[in-house]
Amino acid sequence: MTRLAELDAATARDWIGRWDRQQEVYLADREERFTALIDAVESGAGRPDPLIIDLGCGPGSLAVRLLDRLPAATVVAVDADPVTLSLGRAAYAGRPGLRFADLDMRVPGWEAGLGLDPGQQADAVVSTTALHWLTGPELRALYRALGVLLRRGGLFLDGDHLRLDQGSAPVIAGLERVLEEREALRRFPDGHAGRADDWAQWWRAVIADPALTDAAAERARRGLDASSHDQAAGVRLDTHVSALRAAGFAEVGTIWQRGGNRLLCAVR
């Protein structure tokens, strides 16, 4: 997929640390949300060795935290971004229970590439800060696929900024944004400059690194730039809830929240 020879594990971990700090510019309570998600998986899986599928895994930040808590688990970490996949594979090569899969969830039939045994189903499917990039039709197709991938009683958990409809709840939707803004201000009262990259700065640094040049070029070829996505549907809470219910999930609700930053849970 990409040239990994020059990307050693230590360098990849440095990049992932920089990625995590960049993500916290936008998510002051990112670790708290990770913890809540993993608590739900640990409690809801009903076994010490669950099969977990991590959608839009990035460099594996959630996947390795899941395995730290549940070392007997198997995590299939799915993404289509060659940069973050390269970092995760280099940083966590040989990590027991972890497997990365280069798959695009927008492409029908992507789930066939997960490498599962015939009839094998997951105990949990998880995602964080990823699915808002998908359109309404893409989300509906994804959730139909998850209805087959998940065992009966299995959990889908999505941590993301999912917004209320401004038309039906303008005051509450506005208050959610205020809470997020004030949380960010408390974390970085003088701004994040010098403490962490923002999204654009992180990607500019990646493009400038010779060890990631090929991966960055492949990312551009795949059309994965943020500017190419329409987030209008993917950030709406009602889009996700209605698509999950249409896919046959028995229960759908928010189990953790800070402003519009939610952990949405659905039970198969």
Image (cartoon, rainbow, N blue to C red):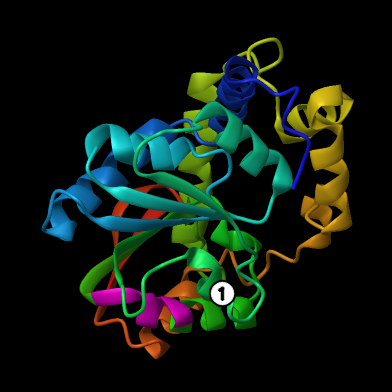
Spot occupied by residue 85 in the image (x, y as percentages of width and height): 63, 43
Task: Out of 150 and 127, give the one closest to the viewer.
Answer: 150
Label 1 Cα neighbours within 10 Å, binned few <14 / some 14-19 / many ≥20: few
Mainly helix, strand or loop, the magenta region? helix
Task: Out of 41 and 120, give the one closest to the viewer.
Answer: 120
Q: Is residue 212 magenta?
A: no
Q: Note whether residue 168 is visible.
A: no
Spot occupied by residue 241 in the image (x, y as percentages of width and height): 41, 76
Res. 193 image quadrant: top right
Q: Note whether residue 201 is visible.
A: yes
Q: What's the amino acid at mark 1?
A: Gly
* Outermost top residue: 194
Task: Out of 196 and 57, give the one closest to the viewer.
Answer: 57
Describe the element under mark 1 as helix, strand or loop: loop
Q: Is residue 149 magenta?
A: yes
Q: Is residue 177 left or right of residue 206?
A: left
Q: Which residue is mark 1?
A: 167
The magenta stretch is: 145-151
Q: Is residue 20 left or right of residue 62?
A: right
Spot occupied by residue 76 in the image (x, y as percentages of width and height): 43, 54
Res. 91 image quadrant: top right
Q: Residue at x 47, y 30 (%)?
A: 28
Q: Residue at x 58, y 44 (%)?
A: 58
Number of labels in the image equals: 1
Spot occupied by residue 261 in the image (x, y as percentages of width and height): 45, 49
Q: Residue at x 40, y 68 (%)?
A: 116
Res. 246 image quadrant: bottom left
Q: Is residue 18 left or right of residue 226?
A: left
For the C terminus, which image quadrant? Answer: bottom left
Q: Residue at x 57, y 36 (%)?
A: 88
Q: Does residue 39 sit above or below 208 in this rendering?
A: below
